[in-house]
């Protein structure tokens, strides 16, 4: 019954996406769970494949380090490097983040996330970003959802707050190779005061494979995924990846 309820929730959430058609943190879905003393380094990114020159072959890379000060407080530093048609191989922004866990139960966890982003490209204002993170889980499945709010500040700011959300349904039973499979999605809705029309919103949904292993007493995690765009403003296809080492 619990499995059915979780799957039903995910299906309803994606139907909402299709009917409306979020700002994603470059294809990372943040877990609300904080583990004291955890320290890690990761490299993630995406590569676009599209018929349009404005999207095709553009790619984005994020270098991130994080540390959990307590069992409820975690800090992170992210460096973003992008390669777009008009700004090739550009240092896009630097993010300072803090996450505070609210609930930590076996079947449910939630957290609040705050970030200040120093933007160094495209003559844009800096950004304030805040999120609500939650996770529902049982023995077989987990569903993680991020609700994201982002606002530009400073003289070059666009004004208004943008809203997005992302979700990840993970099937915990390993495949033959020991990897796990998940359904993953990212949606950008536009400004809260006036959501973009369906065709001008960005929505990417697909699958992701995850593999964890231990090497020299360190925990490594690797994931790779494929996303397809479901609106005119979305890149046709995206290849996403993430590599992480936990010390």
Image (tube, helix red, strand yellow):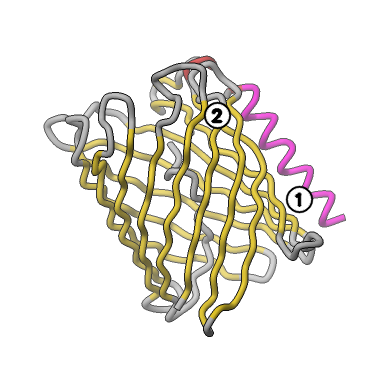
Find out whether residue 4 is within the magenta segment. Answer: yes
- Who is closer to the viewer here, 244 or 232? 244
Quarter containing the C terminus: bottom left
Task: Give x and y (percent) for residue 200.
Answer: 47, 17
* 36 left or right, relative to 140: left
Q: Above or below — where is 244 with respect to 133? A: below
Image point (25%, 30%), residue name: 87
Image point (42%, 45%), residue name: 25
* 200 left or right, relative to 135: left
Circle 2 crowding by C-alpha within 10 Å: few under 14, some 14–19, many from 20? many
Question: Helix, strand, or loop for circle 2?
Answer: strand
Which label was assigned to residue 203? Answer: 2
Task: Give x and y (percent) for residue 185.
Answer: 60, 39
Task: Give x and y (percent) for residue 212.
Answer: 62, 68
Image point (37%, 72%), residue name: 67
Q: Main secondary structure of the magenta part?
A: helix
Does the residue at mark 2 contact the one at mark 1 (Cβ under 8 Å)?
A: no
Q: Above or below — where is 111 with respect to 86? A: below
Q: Which residue is mark 1?
A: 6
Image point (57%, 55%), residue name: 134
Question: Helix, strand, or loop for circle 1?
Answer: helix
Quarter containing the N terminus: bottom right
Task: Give x and y (percent) for residue 39.
Answer: 41, 75
* 238 left or right, relative to 170: left
Task: Give me the C-alpha separation between circle 2 and circle 1.
Answer: 22 Å
- Who is closer to the viewer here, 203 or 33? 203
The stretch in magenta equals 1-19
């Amino acid at each position: 019954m619990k499995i059915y309820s979780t799957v039903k929730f995910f299906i309803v959430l994606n139907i909402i996406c299709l009917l409306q058609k979020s700002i994603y943190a470059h294809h990372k879905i943040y877990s609300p769970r904080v583990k004291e003393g955890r320290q890690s380094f990761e490299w993630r990114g995406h590569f676009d494949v599209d018929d349009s020159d404005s999207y095709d072959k553009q790619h984005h890379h994020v270098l991130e380090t994080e540390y959990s000060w307590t069992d409820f407080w975690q800090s992170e530093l992210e460096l973003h490097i992008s390669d777009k048609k008009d700004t090739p191989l550009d240092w896009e922004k630097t993010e300072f983040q803090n996450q505070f866990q609210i609930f930590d139960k076996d079947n449910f966890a939630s957290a609040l996330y705050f970030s200040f982003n120093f933007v160094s490209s495209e003559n844009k204002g800096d950004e304030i970003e805040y999120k609500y993170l939650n996770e529902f889980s049982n023995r077989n499945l987990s569903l993680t959802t991020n609700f994201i709010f982002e606002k530009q500040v400073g003289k070059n700011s666009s004004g208004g707050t943008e809203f997005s959300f992302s979700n990840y349904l993970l099937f915990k039973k390993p495949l033959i190779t020991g990897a796990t499979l998940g359904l993953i999605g990212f949606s950008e809705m536009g400004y809260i005061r006036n959501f973009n029309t369906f065709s001008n919103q960005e929505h990417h949904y697909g699958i992701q494979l995850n593999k964890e292993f231990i090497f020299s007493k360190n925990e490594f995690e690797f994931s790779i995924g494929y996303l397809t765009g479901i609106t005119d403003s979305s890149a046709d296809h995206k290849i996403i990846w993430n590599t992480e080492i936990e010390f």
